[in-house]
């Protein structure tokens, strides 16, 4: 399989390091280094290539958009507010597919920090404890960078 760089149709605004650090502090989360750098360099965007195929239980996932420190629907803050009580606090909705399912990053301070999961809204339920949460989440990659470098094009399927 040919490796190619991932490009992004990104917003014009790029946050400062201080703004990203303030976001972490305000929401009491820890962004892994690879996603922190992504925010500084791209601040969200639509990746190309955009297809993820590494989880056989899910089939092909189209990554529609990756969130940044933006206002509105493509912003991390908006997604924190919308998914509060729906996606556990240890996860941050960092992107979506065209159907509204979420790409989530583990932002906890434990050894799973940085792992990426897929949250299917069709299987949403109210969770009562952190142990039950993974029943609604599907593992994608150990890190944001690993997710991004495994994206493929239609021609590579």
Image: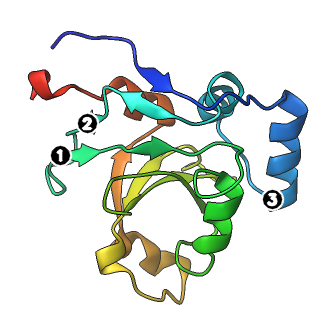
Up-down relation of residue 6 to residue 75 (above or below): above
Query: Distance between the Cα atoms at labels 1 and 2?
Result: 6 Å
**Residue beneath the point at 37% across and 23% down:** 149
**Residue beneath the point at 15% across and 14% down:** 1
Q: Secondary structure at mark 3?
A: loop
Sequence-earlier tag: 3 or 1: 3
Up-down relation of residue 79 to residue 149 (above or below): below
Dot 2 surroundings within 10 Å: few (below 14), some, or many (20 or more)?
A: many
Residue 156: image location, x then y, percent: 12, 22
Label 1–label 2 contact, CB within 8 A: yes
Q: Secondary structure at mark 2?
A: strand
Q: How has the structure been colored for display?
A: rainbow
Sequence-earlier tag: 1 or 2: 2
Looking at the rendering, which quadrant does residue 119 occupy?
bottom left
Image-based side of 135 in relation to 91, left or right: left
Image-based side of 113 in relation to 62, left or right: right
Residue 53 or 139: which is nearer the viewer? Answer: 53
Sequence-earlier tag: 2 or 3: 3
**Residue beneath the point at 49% across and 36% down:** 144
Query: Distance between the Cα atoms at labels 3 and 1?
Result: 33 Å
Q: Secondary structure at mark 1?
A: loop
Image-based side of 53 in relation to 71, left or right: left
Q: Which mark is residue 28?
A: 3
Q: Which mark is residue 51?
A: 2
**Which quadrant is the C terminus positioned in?**
top left
Residue 77 visible in the displayed image: yes
Residue 122: image location, x then y, percent: 29, 77
Residue ID for mark 1: 60
């Amino acid at each position: 399989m040919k490796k190619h760089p991932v490009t992004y149709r990104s917003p014009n605004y790029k946050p400062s390091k201080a703004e990203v650090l303030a976001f972490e502090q305000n929401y009491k989360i820890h962004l892994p280094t690879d996603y922190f750098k992504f925010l500084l360099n791209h601040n969200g965007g639509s990746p190309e290539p955009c297809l993820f195929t590494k989880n056989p239980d899910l089939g092909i996932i189209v990554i529609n958009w990756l969130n940044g420190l933006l206002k509105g629907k493509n912003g991390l803050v908006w997604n924190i507010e919308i998914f509060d009580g729906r996606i556990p606090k240890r996860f941050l909705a960092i992107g979506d597919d065209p159907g509204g399912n979420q790409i989530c990053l583990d932002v906890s301070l434990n050894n799973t920090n940085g792992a990426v999961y897929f949250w299917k809204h069709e299987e949403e339920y109210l969770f009562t404890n952190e142990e039950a949460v993974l029943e609604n989440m599907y593992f994608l990659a150990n890190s944001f960078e690993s997710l991004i470098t495994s994206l493929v094009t239609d021609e590579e399927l």
